[in-house]
Image: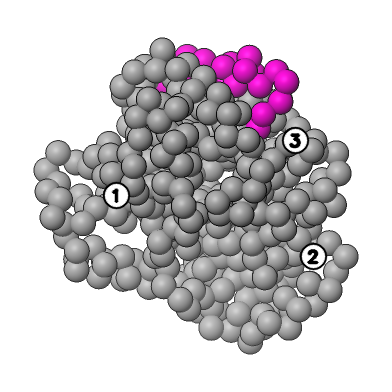
Amino acid sequence: MQNYHPKKIFIETTAREYPLTRQILDYYSEIPVEEIKNPRQLVHQILQQPDPITYGKQFLLISRQKARFLKKCPGTRNYICCGYKILNTANNCHLDCTYCILQGYFNNPLMVVYVNIEELFTELREQFAQHPNKFYRIGTGELTDSLILEPVTQYGEKLVHFFKDYSNAIIELKTKSVNIDNLLGLKHNRRTVISWSLNSDLIQQQEEALSPSIDERLAAAKKCQAAGYWLGFHFDPIIYYENWEADYFKTVEKIFSVIDGKNIAWISLGALRYPPSLDGIIRQRHPESPIVYGEFISGKDQKLRYFKPIRIQVFKKMVEWIRDFDPSVFVYLCMESSEVWKKAFGWTPEKMSTLSRLLDERVQPPAFKRG
Ligand code: SF4
């Protein structure tokens, strides 16, 4: 995997004086820098390019988060979500997986890092203090890959350090990268889950070609296990193809050949799904990818999904394999209906609050008392 190397860095004037800005500029000392008052015009210019998504990733925007950092995960209507909170520290990702939902998500195609991290910590401190009996399961990997810029920003390191002091919160750093070396020696009190997005080897090579291999990701997970972290794994998106069964089984087998189930906070499963607007973007940007040529239906949230019997078959197999290796590992479905849960798993959490509580309980310290 190549580390991110922008062609040019833009700094919003209001982000100029933050220590993290200085740190990023020191790291990229050879790269031209331009200060701008407002990125609106720059974004407008990039959006005029024939492929603004590819073009925009070449530029890093150092910005100040002006909205709240912590938000509810938008989830999806009519399906069971997991009650996650998103911490918006950066936007976009240069790994460019063919199916990446972010391709259709942002009006701003630049890579963005928010440098006002002290304001982020103030916001979290206040939030946690106001609700000491509420448990916060938070992740940074929804609008970017959590560790993709770790060598540059050490955002993950700063978050591990911050969260170690809170018994009513946990941070999940979700990644496809292997940028974990600076996290290994840190004191973390098991208040951080380091998670990897996994797939079959074939899908990794075909659809995630700029990312580390599955073996490399699991080798990084093994190091984090030795450092005492909680681990998470996300099979999302699972892609259905002729030989999916043998290939995905191999990845499940690989996990349990190097990871002890008692260190796994959770494994999630989610089948390929995307808004119709992404279909044209994938066909245009990744014409070699076969993933959009499967048969799909429009779900209750209008996203294109595999037919229900296929989703049930895939989830059923996956959970059986995982349970055969270790029945104590908590497996959940990302954005699925109660019916699919029941048919694939034999039970359903019915509603978001139940799934949310079960996930919280996996990682709550014994002393935590829910209000
Ligand atoms: S690693 Fe994640 S965020 Fe980055 S391109 Fe792939 S799917 Fe998108």
* Range covered by the magenta-colored residues: 239-259
Image: 340 above or below 369 = above
**Along the horizontal axis of the image, is 259 left or right of 131?**
right
Q: Residues within 10 Å of mark 2 (few under 14, many from 20)?
A: some
The image position of residue 140, as x and y in percent, is 46, 54
Q: Amino acid at mark 3?
A: Gly
Q: Is 160 situated above or below 263?
A: below
Q: Are marks 2 and 1 in contact (CB under 8 Å)?
A: no
Does the closest atom of ligand 1 sit within 8 Å of the Cβ of label 2?
no
Secondary structure of the residue carrying numbered label 3 = loop
Question: In the image, what residue type sits under mark 2?
Answer: Pro
Estimate the spatial distance between the alpha carbons at disc 1 and disc 3, rounded to whole Å: 33 Å
Callout 2: helix, strand or loop? helix
Q: Earlier in the sequence, mark 1 or mark 3?
A: 3
Q: Which mark is residue 353?
A: 1
Disc count in the image? Answer: 3
The disc label shown at residue 1, or none = none
* Numbered tag placed on residue 52 in the rendering: 2
Q: Position of residue 355 (x, y in %)?
A: 32, 42
Q: Give the Cα distance between marks 2 and 3.
A: 27 Å
Q: Which residue corresponds to the image point at 61% horizontal and 28% vertical from the top-left?
A: 310
The mark closer to the camera, 2 or 3, is 3
Left/right of residue 118 with respect to residue 179 in the rendered view:
left
**Tag 1: residue type?**
Ser
Q: Residue at x 69, y 59 (%)?
A: 104
| Separation of marks 2 and 1 at Cα, in angstroms | 39 Å
Q: Position of residue 24 (x, y in %)?
A: 57, 63
What is the crowding at mark 3: few (fewer than 14 residues within 10 Å), some, or many (at least 20)? few
